Image (cartoon, coloured by chain):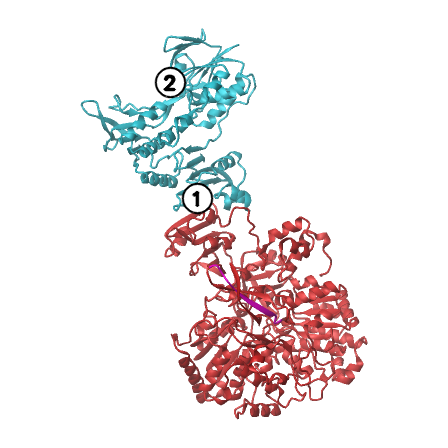
Amino acid sequence: MERLLIIGNGMATARLLKELVDGGCQFRVTVIGDEPRHAYNRILLSRLLSREIAGTDLQLLPESWLAEHNIEVITGVAVDEIDRNSKTALLANGDTVQYDQLILATGARSIMPALPGMEGPHVHQFRTWQDCEELESLGDQQKNVIVAGGGLLGIEAACGLAELGAQVTVVHSGQWPLNRQLDRAAGHLLAEALEHRGIRLMLGQRCASVLRDDDACLHGATLEDGTVLHGDAIVFAIGITPNDALARNAGLPVDHGICVDGHLRSEDKSIYALGECARVCGENVGLMEPVNQHAAILAGVLNGKDPDPWAPTPTPTRLKVTGEEVFSSGVLDDDSAEEIAFSDPVSQTYRKLIIKGQKLIGAVLLGDTSDGNWYHQLIINGDSIQSVRQQLVFGQLASENIS
Amino acid sequence: MSQACKNTTSTTCAYCGVGCGVVMTATESESGAVVWRATGDESHPANQGRLCVKGSALGDTLTPENRLLEPSIDGQTCEWDEALDTVASRLKKVIDEHGPDAVAFYVSGQLLTEDYYVANKLMKGFIGSGNIDTNSRLCMSTAVVAHKQVFGSDTVPGCYEDLELADLLVITGSNMAWTHPVVYQRIAAAKARRPNMKVVVIDPRRTATCDLADLHLALTPGTDGYLFDGLFAWLASNDHTDTDFISAHCENFEQSAAESLQRFKGIGELAKICGVEASTLEQFFQWFADNDRAVTVFSQGINQSSSGVTKAAAILHCHLATGRIGKPGATPFSITGQPNAMGGREVGGLANQLAAHMDIGNEAHRQLVSSFWNTDRLAAQPGLKAIEMFDAIERGEIKAVWIMATNPVVSLPDADRVRAALEKCPTVIVSDCVDNSDTLAFANIRLPASGWGEKDGTVTNSERCISRQRPFTEPAGQAMPDWWIITGVAQRMGFKDAFDYSCPADVFREHAALTGTANEGRRDLNLSALATLSDQEYEQLVPVQWPVSASYTSGTARLYADGHFFTPSGKARFVSTTPALPGRSTDARFPFWLNTGRIRDQWHTMTRTGRSTRLLNHIDEPFVAMHPEDLLALGLREGQIAEVSSPCGRIHVVVRSDAGQQRGSVFVPIHWTDQFASAARVDSLVPAITDPTSGQPEFKQVPVAVTSAQCQWYATVITHDHVPPLPGSLYWSAKPLAGAQEYRYAGQQQPDLDSLKSHWQDLVDDWVSLADSGSPHMRLVGYRAGKPVLWAALSSERVSPDSDWVARMMGEPDSLSPAALCLGQPLDGADTSPVVCSCLQVRQQTLTTLIGDGADDTEEVGRACGAGTNCGSCLPEITALIEQQQPTAMEATCE
C-alpha cells in the first residue's frame, strides 16, 4: 500500500481526507500538523471568540473516524524539510517520514508588516485556535486593542473582541470596511453598525509603527498621518500570505504559493498542493468553496479518477459575525453596469445588484443575506434577469413566484 | 364578530331603476361598531331576493367620511334656522328684483317622491316659475316625450315579468348585465328555463349583456333610429301588422307608415346604413314578425340622442303596429336609470311637466292644480330644461340656483362650461349628503341632506312599482331630509299654509290625492287608493304598481291591454319618426365615436360607491376602451394614459383594450370626477346638443380624438393620509382602500427618488428605497415612528401591488420586514389577479385554475368557489373566462 503524507492539518486536509475516504482510499495516510489540535473549523473562530459557540463545535473529523480509517495524525510537530530524492520529510522533532505521494496543505499566515516595534509581546494574529485564545484573554481583561485591517478577518476579530468587552479600534486603509467586498453605501452602513457596537474606525489609515515603552511594553501605535493610538495590544489582519517556504526550500516552483496545475499537481509528479498554500493555475484562493473544490479534485486524482481540472469560479464572500450579515459576490465596480439598490435603514438591510447586458454580474447584501446563494448562482449561470428585474432585489421567492 | 342581530329594516336600494327591495341587518363588530349588511328582500317583486354587487355593498357606503354635517353660508357654518332664513331671503330677493324665472331648482332622480313633490310644488306652484328640472332630463326625458306623443301619457305599459315571459326579447341601448344586473339575472334565469326564448341585443359594443344574445346587432353608432323606422316599414309592408288593433285603438297609422315606407329602401340598404349584415338584420326582422310575445327594452342608448324621441317613438310604433302592448310578454319597456326617475316624473319634476302627470300647457290641468294647491301663482309656462337652465345661468338670467342631490359639474354635457356658469352665478345653493362633490365647490350655501339609510319616503321603479325607502340609521351630524329643508324654506318664503307637513306621509297623501283629483280614468297616474293611508299604513306600505285606485286597489301590472290610451281621442297616435344621424359627425380631427356609460360596480359620480373598496376592485381607474387594432394603429398599449379630446375639452384616462368595441368607436365610463381623478369627467367632452323636444343630451355619440398622453412613468402610492398629487404628474386617480388610499400617477418627466422623498417628507421619518439605475423602476416605503405609513412604486409601466394587503400592513409595526412590504404583495403564493366576483372576492386566477381543472360552466365554478353565486353580476365575465379557456365549447351566439 502506497504511503500518502499530508503536511498541514487544517480545513483543506480535513476535507481532502473525507473526499479520499468517500472515494475508496487505497493509501496508508499520515497527516502531520504543527498545531496541537486535530483539524478544526477555522471559520468559526470568530464565533468562538464571541462565545456564541463552544470549542467542540469546531471539530471537523472525530478521532474515532480517523482511527476507523487508519489515518495516522501527528499533531504539534512542524515539518522542517522535504527531501524529494529520498521522498522523505524531516520533522522538527528529528523524525523522518517516508512518502510515496506528498500533499502540501500548509495553509497561509497573516502578513506581519515590518514596522518599528513589531518585535515583542502583544502583537497578535487571528488565524489559529491559539490566536483566538489570546484574543479571548485580551477581551476578558477589557483591554484596549488596535486591530490593523478592516477586511473580513479584521472585522470578525474586532467584533469578537468588542463583544467580550475590549475597547477596539480598527485601522483600515480603505475608505470603508470590507472595501473589497462592499460598495460604498453598504460599507458605510456596515461602518455605522460597527460603530454602534462600540468599535472605533480609523479609515484611510495604516499603522506606521508599534509604540513600546522602555520595558518594551506595547502601549499603542502611530498611524501614517502621525496620529497616536493608545492600546494594550495590536492584532494584525491586513491580509494573508501562503505558507510556501517548505516547497521553495525543496526546490519546487513557488510564486505567492506553491505552483500546481489544475489537478493540483506540482512539477514533482509525486507532490501536490491545495488550499491557501497553493497557487493553482496562477490563482490564489482564500475562501472555503474553492478549497473544497481543490479537495474534491485532488481526491479524484489520487483515487485514480480523471476529474476535470480546477478552474476559478466567482466565489461569494460572507462575513461571519452574528448580527452583521454581509454577502458579496461577483463584480462590484463596473462603471458601465447598472445597479439596483435597495436600502432599508429601518432594519439595517441593504442590497445592491449589479447588472450588465441584462445579466446579474454582482451582488452585495447586508442584513438579510438569505438570498446570497441564489444571486451567486444567477451570476454564475449568466441568464437574463430582465423578466424578473422588478422583483429581483426581493430575492428568490419573490422572483420565482411573481411575474 | 358577534352576530347578535340588533336591527333589521326593509327598504329599497339607492341605485338603479330596477328598485330592488333590500333588507338591512345590523351586526356588531368586535370593536363594537355597527356593521350593516345588505341582503335581497325575498318579498319584493322586483328582485325576489336577488341583489347585485352594488346593492350588496350598500353597507360599505354608510361610512361617516366626507359627509356634509352642518349647514354653512358663504363658508361659515351656521344653525339650520339661519341657513333656511338665508336661502329663503336670497331667493325672495332675486324673485322680487328679477322675477320668478330668475331662480331655478336643479334636482335629481335620487330624491324621494316626497322631496320631489315639495320641490316641484314650491317652484311651480308658489314661486311661480317652471324652472325646476332634474337630472332625469339626462336619462329619461326622451322616453317621457315619446310615451306622451304616442300614448298620450308617460306610461311604461309593461312590467319586469314581461321580460321573462317574452319569446323574443330585444335589448337596445342597454348594457343591462352591468347597469340593471338583477333584471338581467331574471332574464338569464328565464332563458335558462326556456332555451327557445330569443334574445337580440342591439348595441355598437359587444357588452356583457351580449352573453345572453342569440343575435347581436353591432350597429354603426347612432343608426338605431333607422333600424326601428325600417322595422316599422318592413312590418307594415309585409303584412305583419295587427290591423284590428290598429284600426280600433290607433290613429295616424297610414300616414306614419307611408312616411316610413317612403324612406325604407329594403333590408340590404338599411343594413348598409346600420353597418350590419343584411342576413342578420333580416333574421331580427323575421323574429320580430314571428313572435307575438315580443318585448323591446330600451334605455340610454336610445334616449341619450339628439333624435332620441323619434327613436323611442319608432320602437313604440313597432309594438303598436303589431298590437303587442300591455299584454303578458308583449310590450315596449323603457328601463330607467335612477331609483326614482319615475317618481320624479310622477310629481312633475321635469320643467315641462306640471304635477301628477298633468301638463303645464293644459289649462284644465293648470286650473285643477291651482285649485288643489290653493295658489294663484302657478307657473304659466314650461321652465328651462337642464341644458337651457345652465345656459341661462351662464348668461346671468338665472341669478340663484338650488341644486339638490346631484352633481351637474360632472354629469351635464359640456361640463367645463357648467363649472364656469356656476362660478359666475351669484347664489348657488347645494343640498347634498357629501362634502366633496365637484359641484359643492361652487356652493354659497351648503345644506346637509340626509342620505340613503336615513331618509324616509317612497320611490317608483321602472315598472311603476312604488316602494318604501325606510330609515335605519340616525342622520349624520345635522343632516335633515330634503322634504324638510324645502318645506322650511317654503314656509319662510311666506307659504306656511301650503307647506304645513310634519312627516313624509303627509306629503305622500297629498301627492296621491292630487293624482286622483278629477281623474276618473282620464289620467294614467292614479294613486287615489293611497291618499288616505294612515301614518302606520304608509310606514308598512308594501310595494305596489300604479295605478292604485278604486278600480285597481292592489295595483296594476300592465296598462293599455284594453286599448284605451290617454290621448284626447283615447287612441294611440302614430307620429313622424324621421330618423337622423348624430348631431355631430366624426372627421379627420376627431375621428372616433365616443360612447359613454356605466360600469358594473359604480354608480353615477361615485359619491357613494366610491366609498366601497370592493366596488373598486372590478375596475378602479377611469379608462377608454378601444378595439385592439385601433390601439395598434395609434401606437398605444393597454395601461398607458390616453388623452381623449373633443372641441369642448379633454380628459386623461387609462387605455383598455376591448375587442368588443367596434373599430373607430371608443367607450369611457361616466363615473369619475375630480374627486377620483385628475381629468376624467367624460361629460366635459360632450357638446350640449340635445333632442329638440325632450332636451336630452346626446351622450352616446361624441366625435373625439384619442392620442397618447406620452407618459413615461407610472406610479402607485398607498397611504393612510390623503396626499396632494405628485408634482409633475399629468394624470392621477384615487381609490379608497380599507383605512387607506391608493393613488395612481403618470407623467412625462420622471421625478427622481429624492424629489419623491421630499414631496412626502412631512409624513415620513425613514425611507426604505429601491432604485434601478438601468430602468425607471423605483420604490419607497415611508416609516413614521417605526410604522410604515406610505408605499410607493414608480416605473415605466404601472406597478400593481396587492393593494388591500399593503393597506392592511400600513400602520402595523414589525409585522413584516420592510423588504417584504416594499415588494407590495405577500409571498405565500397568494393570488393577486383582478377580483372578478366582488361579492365573494374571488379572483381571476382562482377561476382560471378551476376552469383549467375542468369546471366548464358557471354553476360548477360557483359550487367550487362561490363566485357568481351571490349577486351574479360577474357571471358574464366568468362565462368569458370559460370560453377563453375552452374556445371549442364557445357557441356562436354573438356576431
Q: Is residue B16 above or below residue A106?
A: below
Tell me the kind of residue under disc 1. Ala
Q: Colour of chain A?
A: cyan
Chain (red): B
- Relative to the observer, which residue lies in front, B296 or B194? B194
Q: Residue furthest front?
A: B4
Q: Is residue B388 above or below residue B518?
A: above
Q: Chain of mark 1?
A: A
Q: Which mark is residue A36?
A: 2
Q: State whether residue A207 appears in this view.
A: yes
Q: Quadrant of residue B91?
A: bottom left
Drawn side of residue B871 relative to residue B433, left or right: right
Q: x and y percent of residue B129 in the render?
A: 52, 87
- Mark 1: few, some, or many residues within 10 Å (few <14, many ≥20)? many
Drawn side of residue B31 relative to residue B315, left or right: left
Q: x and y percent of residue B569 in the render?
A: 71, 88
Magenta range is B18-30
Q: Which residue is mark 1?
A: A341
Tell me the kind of residue under disc 2. Pro
Is B26 inside the magenta-drawn segment?
Answer: yes
Q: Chain of mark 2?
A: A
